[in-house]
Image (cartoon, rainbow, N blue to C red):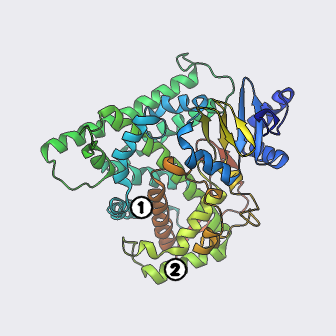
Amino acid sequence: MKSLREAPGPKATQLFSMLRALSRNRLRFFEGLWRDYGEVVRIPLANKQLILISNPEHLEYVLRKNYLNYRKAALFNKERIYALGGSLLTTEGPHWLKQRKLAQPAFKKDALAQLVDDMVAVTVRDLEGWAPHLDGAPFDVAEDLTAIAINVASKTLFGVDMRPATAKVREAVGVIVRGGAERMSSVFRLPVAIPTPRHQRIKRALKTLDEVVYGVIRERRAEEQRDGDAPERDVLTRLLRAQDPETGASMSDTELRDEVATFLIAGHESTAASLAWTTWLLGTHPEAEARVRAELAEVLGGEAPTVETLPRLDYTRRVVMESLRLYPPSWLFDRESIEADTLGDYAVPPRTVFCVVPWIQHRDPTWWPDPERFDPDRFLPEAIKARPTFSYATFGGGPRRCIGDEFAIMEMVIVIALMLQRYRLSVVAEHPVELLPSIALRPLHGVQVTLARAEP
């Protein structure tokens, strides 16, 4: 059996050149390592050794078969905890399991079905606000899609209209996301207690977010005391009423804050980024856009999507899945071994940090022929069955697979459908489209489009 030290990778003497490459372009840094060294790569960075894995069997082992031996890596997770607290995204062990059991019912099929009308109503209202752009100058549709994602999240998570606070929340979340991404990608980090300008901005943004989230929680608790048998119209209500079947305990305000803040930040940031990429892909692949429009006409006939018609938008869903393959919002995630283990031919010492980069997983020609080509039919049922499950890692996998995966896909299908029913978007060809691997993988310069009314 090979030892972990024998895993291929750059030498420690290349540290400074690696740091320069990492700072210039994180995605290309990891992709270059994969192409140079293969499916298991040792990365000696400063005083920590990271292992990049991309083999679907290895990924399945770490995320599903032996997941109890692999936790979130402390190297990165302490930064997430600072912003998100003890949420599903950051916790481990019994606390995570308790929170997952309490939150899971809010994301089951029947619960999601009750959110469709709210998603549609918010999206229609916000799309109507695009009218001033009609037949006018180009604008950044990514910004407008971010606003839709925040407003959909606030309505479906909180049951409130956050439009008066959308700009404030978007700005606060942007500061938290950018600051967290910068700290997580930095090899040398100052403690957050040191009042640097960046740390002060993050603290102010977290205070703003807490004021909004705790305010909504207080209002909802008061409503529950006044009218506790009202329908469960949003995720927050379900979380408030959820009780541990063994102890009967429900979530505290702090636990609710951590979960809701996580859903709001991670949910809207990922969805907004993916909607921007999907819009750009459709705008640069007119044949795919034509197929989506034909499906919308056939299935919806000019009406908004409903619980009954949404499952029939097969091709639109495949477009979303292919967009998530090419531009996975969670472009990097991590695990750390607890006890010694083996992975394929390699020994795994305790506290080995594994990096998983779905951007790489999704460009392996073994599973994705001509991987840079945009082809929604990769997600036809027979094509999915022909690939290993963990060759597609947009939402992670195993017991800790993203709890909001179907929520996100459903929202994206609804927004794309309603947007194309109303408008024809023409991508500005000369506008630069570059990758920004922050917390989510975003287009660095946005997506510039011109707007016209869709033909009936």
Residue 309, quarter of picture: bottom left
Q: Residue furthest left?
A: 226
Q: Position of residue 361 (x, y in %)?
A: 69, 54
Horizontally, is 192 left or right of 411 in the view?
right
Characterize the local packing of mark 2: few (<14), some (14-19) or many (20 or more) Cα atoms within 10 angstroms: some
Q: Earlier in the sequence, mark 1 or mark 2?
A: 1
Instruction: Say whether marks 1 and 2 touch (CB < 8 Å).
Output: no
Q: Secondary structure at mark 2?
A: helix
Q: Is residue 169 above or below residue 283?
A: above
Q: Position of residue 305 (x, y in %)?
A: 40, 72
Q: Is residue 212 visible?
A: no
Q: Nearer the viewer, residue 191 or 386?
A: 386
Q: Nearer the viewer, residue 449 or 386?
A: 386
Label 1 and label 2: CA atoms lie apart by 19 Å
Amino acid type of disc 1? Thr
**Residue designated by label 2:** 295
Q: Nearer the viewer, residue 222 or 13?
A: 13
Horizontally, is 206 left or right of 256 in the view?
right
Amino acid type of disc 2? Glu
**Residue designated by label 1:** 123
Q: Residue at x 45, y 35 (%)?
A: 93
- Counting every numbered tag in the picture gives 2
Q: Secondary structure at mark 1?
A: helix
Q: Is residue 284 above or below residue 154?
A: below
Q: Residue furthest front?
A: 1
Q: Residue at x 59, y 78 (%)?
A: 291
Q: Position of residue 331 (x, y in %)?
A: 63, 47
Horizontally, is 5 left or right of 68 in the view?
right
Q: Position of residue 441 (x, y in %)?
A: 62, 48
Characterize the local packing of mark 1: few (<14), some (14-19) or many (20 or more) Cα atoms within 10 angstroms: many
Q: Is residue 240 visible?
A: yes
